[in-house]
Amino acid sequence: MKSNKNKAGFTLLEMVIAIGIFVIFFILVLGIYSYSLRAEQSSTQLSKLQKEAQLIMEILTKKIRTSKVYYDYYGGDIPVIDDYVETLALIDKNNDITVFALKDSSIAVCSYGSCVNDEDFSVIPTQSVTVSSLRFFISPTDNPFSMDAPPTAYPKITIVIDLRHTQGDDERNLLIQETVPQRLGGL
């Protein structure tokens, strides 16, 4: 009789072990791929938030630097609650008034009209980003410019914006803050 040891092939036990090793390797590779995909999506969300924040801050800082705080809009002195206001009123050298405010989870700007009604405001467009809060810290709270004496301090405005980006089940928040000094009262 001839021996069966010389036959080529795999035993059932060898096949089960090989398939088990392959399944473990496949699960590890799939886990690494899934983790890298989530990290890439998270990075993309944060990048979108930062780009939107940069656009919003550019619009606000440009207008603040070319204007001055319109203290008359607030009735002379700025009525602060918790040291901030939720609307920013500016007036430029042409006496055009601009008001920034939070409307329907977006930053809205009013350049014409009474700036009291919602219809007077237009939204600064953003892509899949909502604004949770918008605060302006104005210093000083009373008008430093008068005909009686030179100003002791020039106004500066600190802007604090809380942005949110939601994609699927993942949510990203970004809190940005910038202090913008006015150039010689904005004029």
Image (tube, rainbow, N blue to C red):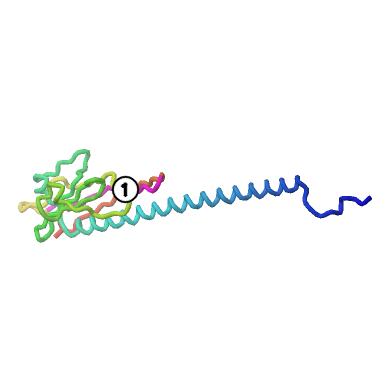
Q: Nearer the viewer, residue 103 or 82?
A: 103
The range drawn in magenta is 151-168
Amino acid type shown at disc 1: Leu
Q: Residue 52's image quarter?
A: bottom left
Task: Return the x and y of residue 183 as percentages of the image width and height.
Answer: 18, 59
Taking the image as shown, residue 18 lies to the left or right of residue 139, namely right
How would you classify the magenta stretch by its main secondary structure?
strand
Within 10 Å of the Cα at label 1, are there few (<14), some (14-19), or many (20+) other Cα atoms? many
Residue placed at 22% from the left, 38% from the top? 82
Residue placed at 71% from the left, 49% from the top? 18
- Viewport quadrant of the C terminus: bottom left
Residue placed at 81% from the left, 55% from the top? 8
Task: Return the x and y of residue 66 as percentages of the image width and height.
Answer: 18, 60
Q: Residue furthest right?
A: 1
Q: Residue furthest front?
A: 1
Task: Return the x and y of residue 127 as percentages of the image width and height.
Answer: 31, 54
Circle 1 residue: 163
